[in-house]
Amino acid sequence: MGDREDIKQLFLFAEEVAPQEPYLANRYVALARKISSRKRISLRAYNRKHCRKCSVFFTSKTLQVRTRKDHVVYQCRCCGNMTRIRK
């Protein structure tokens, strides 16, 4: 299995276990980030699923979403990091 598939699988595992075990979901995200940094693989497709600063997997408890006229703001409730995404 290739590295891109490993990252994809880790994010799928994180989605499955996030409601019951958020710590395990965060660990899966940290592992995926470690693989991507070692192999120079972009996580752009998964930026809306985790915090780029503290590696927390986003759930309804860890994410606040606000809409503005021209962009959407994702704010991590763990570290306070904000990500602005154009509509």
Image (cartoon, helix red, strand yellow):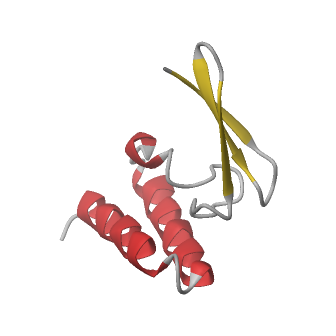
- Which residue does the image show at 50% across and 45% down from the upper left? 48
Q: In the displayed structure, does residue 2 sit left or right of residue 69?
A: left
Q: Is residue 72 above or below residue 2?
A: above
Q: Would you identify the image quadrant in which residue 26 lies?
A: bottom right
Q: Is residue 37 above or below residue 57?
A: above
Of the 4 image quadrants, the one containing the N terminus is bottom left
**Closest to the observer: 71 or 8?**
71
Q: What percent of the width, then of the height, locates residue 71? A: 59, 21
| Residue extending furthest toward the left | 1
| Residue extending furthest toward the top | 70
**Closest to the observer: 44 or 81?**
81
- Which residue does the image show at 44% across and 72% down from the upper left? 14
Q: Would you identify the image quadrant in which residue 35 lies?
A: bottom left
Q: Is residue 85 above or below residue 81?
A: above
| Residue extending furthest toward the right | 80
- Which residue does the image show at 39% across and 77% down from the upper left? 16
Q: What percent of the width, then of the height, locates residue 56? A: 64, 63
Q: In the displayed structure, does residue 63 sit left or right of residue 18?
A: right
Q: Would you identify the image quadrant in which residue 74 lies?
A: top right
Q: What percent of the width, then of the height, locates residue 68? A: 65, 21
Q: What percent of the width, then of the height, locates residue 19? A: 52, 78
Q: In the displayed structure, does residue 5 sit left or right of residue 24?
A: left
- Which residue does the image show at 47% across and 58% down from the upper left? 38
